[in-house]
Image (cartoon, helix red, strand yellow):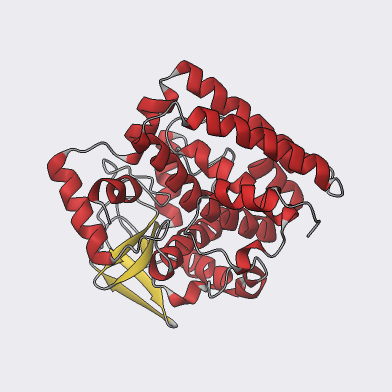
Amino acid sequence: MNNQRKGMFLIGSFGVFLLSAWMLTAKQEISMENQRIYQEAVKLQEKVDALGFKGFCLSDFPVAMYDGKWDYVFYKGKVEKREPALSTFVGTAFPVEDHFEVIVPTLEQLDSLMSVVGGVEGMLTGGEYGFAQQMATIWHETFHAYQLTNFGILGEKVTTEDMREELEESKESGAPSQEEWLVREVDQKKGLKSKLEGEMSFLKKAVETDASDIDELRRIVLEYSERRDKRLKEMPKEAREAEIRCELTEGTAYYVEAAVYRLACGDEAYKERYLDNLEAYEGGRGKYYRTGFAKCLILDRLAPDWKETFDFTKGLDEVLEEYGSKDDEL
C-alpha cells in the first residue's frame, strides 16, 4: 500500500475522537452498567445480521473499555483487566498484537468528559449520550475491526503492522492527515464547500423520496452524481482520495451505528438523531459520516441485496452509480 494513501486513511480514521488532555480519576473495577451495555449489544447480533453484512459478528472481536487507567477487555465470555492499549479517550478499531480490537471509553468517562466539553465532534449529533449511544458506538467501531480484518480499503489490505508503522511514520514526517486535507481543500474553499452543501441537500432529498417512486430516486441520484463529479475534478488527488475513503469507512460504520440505535430506541428517536440533520455540514470528516450513511440508505432502496457482493473495493459513489443506472426495479 502506498504510504501516503495509507496514511490518509489510517491517521484520524475510524471514528476516533481523541481528547488526550483529559485523564480523569479511574475506577478500579468496571461497573455493572458497562457490563450490561456490552451484554445488551451482543444480544442484538441476530437483528444486526439482518443488515446483510456477511460474517459481521461483534463477539469475534475483543472490546476494550478504557476507564482512564485500565482497559477492561470483553472477549469470549470473560472480562480481563490490563494496561491500556491507548492511554487516551478514543473510540476506534486499533491494532493490538496481531489483531484488531475495539476500544471505547467507559460510559462514566464519557459522561464526565462531555459535562466539561459539551460533546464530541464527529460522533455525537446532539442530545444526551447514554446506554443506547454507547451500544451503537461499540457496533460502529466493531464494524471497522470487521472491515480491516476481512477486507481492507479499496482493495488494499491493512494489517496491524501496517497501521502501527504508519502511525509512527506520520508522527515523524508530519504529513497531512486525512482531516487536514479535507479542511484545507474543502472546508476552507468557499466555492467547494457551497457545492458540497448542495450535494448533501440532494442526498437528503433522495432519502426522503416516496418509497415507491424509484424513477424519481434515480433522477435525484443522477443529478447528485453529476454535481459531485464536477466538484471532485476541482480538488487535488489527495483530498479526493481522503473524501472517498472517509465516506466508505465512516459512512458504512455510521449506517450500522444508526441501525443499532434504531433497534434500541425506536423510529422516532432514530429519525431525530440521524435523519433530521442528514444535510448538516460539519468541518473535517464529520460530514462524510452523513453522506456515506445517506448513500447506504439509498442503496437499500435501489438494490436491497447490495451488501451481498459489497467488499469495500469500490467507493460508495461507484456502487451507487452502478445500481442507480439500472432500468429494472430490483
**Residue projecting furthest to the right:** 212
Specify the quadrant that holds the N terminus: bottom left
Specify the quadrant that holds the C terminus: bottom right
Q: Is residue 9 left or right of residue 302?
A: left
For residue 46, say whether it is visible.
yes
Percent x, y of residue 192: 49, 22
* Above or below for 48 versus 207: below
Percent x, y of residue 324: 69, 48
Q: Quadrant of residue 187?
A: top left
Q: Is residue 277 left or right of residue 189?
A: right
Q: Residue at x 64, y 43 (%)?
A: 273
Percent x, y of residue 217: 77, 42
Q: Quadrant of residue 78?
A: bottom left
Percent x, y of residue 272: 69, 41
For residue 28, say whether it is visible.
no
**Residue projecting furthest to the bottom:** 77
Q: Residue at x 34, y 64 (%)?
A: 157
Query: How many labels sit on residues?
Result: 0
Q: 154 or 265, which is in the foreground?
A: 154
